[in-house]
């Protein structure tokens, strides 16, 4: 059975510019704050990963969602804003909105 448009998921890619020396704190905050657990409770979250760069640069968050609407629902979730307030002191620069991708 092939993929149909209604069963395709979308993948969000978010780059987090981490303040020098705060790398371990960001990894710990993601776990302690249960960010992916909150994402799942928001609805439409399939799974995600926090990727730490090996040679400097921003961390990357890759998450899979059932639909664009599910991702937008997470962006608008007040819980997300509360979690972001805990993480923002660990970041530097502007965090751009996540970019969405689909299977090619």
Image (cartoon, rainbow, N blue to C red):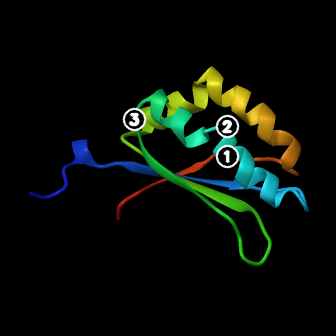
Secondary element at image label 2:
loop
The location of residue 64, given as percent across then percent down, is: 44, 49
| CA distance separating discs 1 and 2 | 5 Å
Q: Earlier in the sequence, mark 1 or mark 3?
A: 1
Q: Is residue 97 visible?
A: no
Q: Which mark is residue 85?
A: none
**Which residue is most to the bottom?**
55
- Of residue 33 and residue 88, the one placed in the foreground of this image is 33
Q: Is residue 8 left or right of residue 43?
A: left
**Discs 1, 2 touching: Cβ within 8 Å:** yes
Which residue is disc 2 drawn over? 33
- Residue 36 picture quarter: top right
CA gap, disc 1 and disc 3? 19 Å
In which quadrant is the C terminus drawn?
A: bottom left
Identify the residue shown where x is 52% and y is 37%.
Answer: 37
Q: Which residue bears the numbered disc 1?
A: 30
Measuring from the top left, give residue 34's x and y in whole percent.
Answer: 61, 39
Residue visible at 61% across and 48% down?
98
- Residue of label 3: 44
Left or right of residue 67: residue 15: right
Q: CA distance from mark 3 to mark 2?
A: 19 Å
Q: Quarter-wise, where is residue 68 in the image?
A: top left
């Amino acid at each position: 059975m092939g993929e149909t448009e209604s069963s395709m998921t979308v993948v969000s890619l978010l780059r987090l510019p981490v303040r020098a020396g705060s790398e371990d704190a960001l990894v710990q905050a993601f776990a302690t704050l249960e960010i992916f657990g909150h994402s799942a409770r928001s609805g439409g979250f399939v799974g995600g990963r926090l990727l730490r760069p090996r040679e400097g640069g921003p961390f990357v968050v890759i998450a899979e969602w059932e639909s664009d609407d599910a991702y937008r629902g997470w962006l608008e979730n007040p819980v997300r804003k509360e979690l972001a307030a805990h993480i923002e002191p660990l970041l530097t620069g502007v965090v751009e909105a996540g970019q969405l991708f689909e299977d090619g």
